[in-house]
Image (cartoon, rainbow, N blue to C red):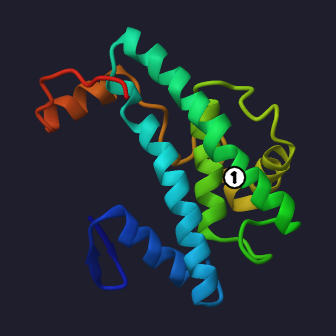
């Protein structure tokens, strides 16, 4: 739960949409908001393959790592590469920084944790990552010791399993 502006909010998507709108990161009109929602939805889909990764067995992690890289490089990254190339702007929507840009950067970073050179065939995404990562507030957030959530470790997995009573194994997709 997040308390903001006198409201108590739950559900990540609602919280992020509210913050994006509040700080002018959600487009200038309905069309831009629809594009932002579409791009965020795509990165959510990609992130879905990654979220269960820490809970997999060693064998399943290797299978899932391969699936994540395959999906990222054959399905998701080519779409964003084309959008950036065709659009000819620095950002995904209009020529303004938006929630979609933050979300795509996070997806890229998450996939790079599985394969560090995953962007080799994507020059637009490489430039995008460098550009967005150099925005002062994002640069500071990405520095070691910031509030950015660390990659889940064994202690995290154990805590989540205990809190959610996950006494079973999760299988790769």
Q: Is residue 2 above or below residue 63?
A: below
Q: Is residue 13 above or below residue 124?
A: below
Location of the N terminus by quadrant is: bottom left
Looking at the image, residue 157 sits to the left or right of residue 28; the answer is: left
Which of the 4 image quarters holds residue 157? Answer: top left
Q: Is residue 9 above or below residue 90?
A: below
Q: Is residue 41 at least partly visible in the picture?
A: yes
Q: Residue at x 69, y 61 (%)?
A: 137
Q: Position of residue 101 (x, y in %)?
A: 66, 62
Q: Residue at x 33, y 14 (%)?
A: 57
Q: Is residue 135 at least partly visible in the picture?
A: no
> Outermost residue toward the front?
74
> Outermost residue toward the top?
59
Q: Nearer the viewer, residue 10 or 73?
A: 73
- Residue that numbered label 1 is attached to: 79
Q: Residue at x 72, y 66 (%)?
A: 92
Which of the 4 image quarters holds residue 135? Answer: bottom right
Q: Nearer the viewer, residue 156 or 169?
A: 169
Looking at the image, residue 147 sits to the left or right of residue 112; the answer is: left
Q: Position of residue 128 (x, y in %)?
A: 80, 53
Looking at the image, residue 32 sits to the left or right of residue 52; the answer is: right
Q: Residue at x 52, y 82 (%)?
A: 21
Q: Please count the marks in the image.
A: 1
Location of the C terminus by quadrant is: top left
> Outermost residue toward the bottom?
29
Q: Position of residue 126 (x, y in %)?
A: 82, 43
Q: Residues within 10 Å of mark 1 (few under 14, many from 20)?
A: some
Q: Secondary structure at mark 1?
A: helix
Which of the 4 image quarters holds residue 154? Answer: top left
Q: Position of residue 41 (x, y in %)?
A: 50, 60
């Amino acid at each position: 739960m997040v308390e903001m502006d006198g409201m108590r909010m739950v559900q990540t998507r609602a919280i992020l949409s509210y913050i994006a709108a509040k700080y002018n990161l959600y487009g200038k009109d309905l069309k831009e908001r629809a594009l932002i929602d579409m791009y965020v939805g795509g990165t959510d889909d990609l992130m879905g393959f990654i979220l269960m990764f820490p809970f997999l067995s060693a064998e399943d992690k290797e299978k899932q790592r391969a699936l994540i890289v395959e999906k990222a490089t054959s399905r998701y990254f080519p779409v964003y590469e084309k959008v950036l190339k065709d659009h000819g702007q620095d950002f995904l929507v209009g020529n303004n920084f938006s929630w979609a840009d933050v979300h795509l950067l996070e997806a890229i970073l998450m996939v790079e944790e599985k394969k560090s050179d995953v962007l080799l065939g994507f020059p637009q995404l490489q430039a995008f990552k460098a550009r967005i990562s150099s925005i002062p507030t994002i640069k500071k957030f990405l520095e070691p010791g910031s509030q950015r959530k660390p990659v889940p470790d064994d202690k995290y997995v154990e805590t989540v399993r205990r809190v959610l009573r996950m006494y079973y194994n999760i299988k790769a997709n």
